[in-house]
Amino acid sequence: MLYRREIDGLRAVAITAVVLHHAGLPFLPGGFLGVDIFFVISGYLITALIVRDLDAGPFSMRAFYDRRVRRILPALLVMLAATIPFAWMWMIPLDFKNYAQSLLASLFSYSNIHFATKEGYFAPDMGRAPLLHTWSLAVEEQFYLLFPVFALFLARKRRGMLVAAIGGLCLLSFAVCLVGVEAFPTINFYFLSSRAWELLAGALFSFVGPSRSRRTNEVGALAGLVLVLLSILVPTSQQAWPSFLTVWPVVGAGLLLVFGIQGTLTARLLSLPPFVGLGLVSYSFYLWHQPVFAFARIRNAAEPGLPVMIALSFGALAVAVLSWRYVEQPFRTRSGARRIGWKTLRILIGSLAVLIVSVSVAGNVTKGLPWRLPPAVTAMLRESEWNKACQYTAEMDLPVFPLKDCLHNPDHPVTYAIWGDSISASLSRVFASELDVRGISLQQLSHGHCAPLPGVSVPSVKQSAHCSQFNTRALEQILATPDITTVVMAASWVKFMSYPEYQIDGVIRSAGDEVPTEIRQRLNDTIATIEASGRRVVLVYPHPQPDAPVIETVMKQMLAGVAQPEVTIAYADFVQNSARSRAVLDAVASPRTIKVFPEEKFCNPSAGDTCALTSAGLPYLADIRHFTASGATLVVAAILDKLPIVPTLPTGPIADAAGDPAR
């Protein structure tokens, strides 16, 4: 296949968009779509190579995969191995365990499936995952594994049906994508089933030749370049991807590949030496930029500023040039003294694979190799875990109600309930202990990602799949249990009130700039229903939350020699960040609702208007929102300060309301 410099120029556009978007450049909101452009290029080139080999004579599957292995594996394995020392030095055990899992997934080409089980690609914490970017490599490798077998089978049986069959699969995958963007957005983003149409579109473009008319080629190539640039400059990560909008960068890349031949103005532009040079090292640049960015974020307490991220981009580019020169090129050279044979290749792959598998298995089995850290750090980490007991998740079956196994201190005659998402779980152990000495039981009703709102879930968060049913049943249990006298509602209100849309009784409601009226009304009705039954409602307001995990900030200070680290945030920042959720809670609470403000324990306006997130070197938060035992103790104290603890059954219409959850 004739080398086309302009394709490397298109690669340069794609990799620049991806890297600068990940660096945080504000005017490239669609920079992540550079990956979609790479998918089209890959589908185009791989199909052209297969067709060329079929036309040249007997197709060699071995020769095909030899090229793929040499193209992909050496540089990938070197990058994976190089991340190990930095993860070893700088990652807390939980993060190291997650890293170890992604390490194995990257090696065996299922990292797209692995990351689909985590938070969405655009979640803030995912920028700290060194191997997040390998999801797209996994998609391509899975395509390379399946597509040549399909193409070869069809070419031998019914060659004339090849284009039609590729087109049919492309449409099928596109249909899956359009359904998935609404029904299962996270899986839709990562899985080959929803991405194959982009690679297959590239395959279809490989069967289309340029026009004999230079004018047509000029217009087609320019239109393609405009579509690509608009795709990078206009969309944002707040939209769901891939979707119908992804057609534009895919078509744009295809038009450039078909019509952007040498002689056109667009091809001459893309063939300029800086573009071609960047395109040649684009694979290594893609491999290295994410680990460099992620470890910079892990190493620093706050998000590195844009100048730092741009400098790191150039640093990653320098490493990429070395990787291209000393790893990619020697293994890809087809002949001559520099060619590395299969024996050497097998030794390299085998050695690095053994290292990667060993670290991955050890990190996973030992829950992050905690012994690699100094004893003081290990002790701090052990004391700073947050309680996950009795917290249900979407990965579990919907529990059977009533939740008898989640009743703490069951022998007491009076019961309080704590109801909410993982925030409620992080409070429950300390709360149960404090209530036990007061002769009170605690019924825990916790489900991750589920604010205590019956009939409500969040479509973009697959972990909230059970929320509607779970909370409906939880409210029924509260109202049907006469012993429950007080209900504490605790959730990550700031996060919950910031979602772009909600599903309420099966109907999708967009949020826009304001929390939907239906959400406000549902929360108001829930509180009113509980209070109408004669029970007290305690509403736990948002607490101060930092930008970076507190436990990591403390660990970094300890590794730097600080015996008792201090972490604070500005009170004004806390007020600003929580303003939207606080306004909603103020609006839905009744005059009877007991309001608890954790900042009364965390913040000291007289001490420089700051909020403390540590005490004696121990974090109040395990990450950015979940309470450690130290933090939970403060919040529970704030709750108990507002409650007259009287372990007797209240008066009121509890018995009458118990059988009627609608009251």
Image: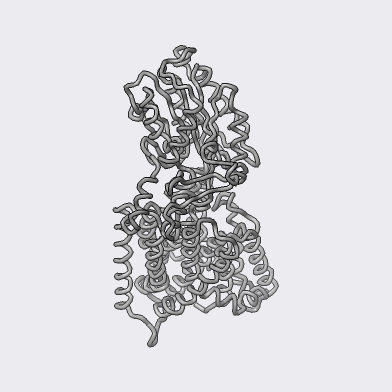
Left or right of residue 421, residue 608 in this image: right
* Residue 268 percent coordinates (x, y): 64, 77
Task: Give the tally of numbered discs.
Answer: 0
User: Is residue 396 at all visible to an observer of this figure?
Assistant: yes
- Compared to residue 393, the image places residue 566 above or below, namely below
Residue drawn at x 29%, y 62% is 358
- In the rendered view, tell whether residue 615 sits above or below residue 560: above
Residue 8 as seen in the image, left or right of residue 298: right
The relative height of residue 568 versus residue 145 in the rendered view (above or below) is above
Q: Position of residue 232 (x, y in %)?
A: 62, 60
State the residue at coordinates (54%, 34%): 597
- The residue shown at (35%, 53%) is 378
Report the colour scheme. Answer: one colour
Does 29 appear above or below 643?
Answer: below
* Nearest the eye: 37 or 459: 459
Regarding residue 447, the answer to whether it shows in the image is no
Q: Position of residue 540 (x, y in %)?
A: 52, 32
Pick out the residue farthest to the bottom.
Answer: 337
Quadrant in the rendering for residue 9 = bottom right
**Image quadrant assignment for residue 100:** bottom left
Residue at the farthest front position:
606
Picture coordinates of residue 103, whole percent (x, y): 37, 60
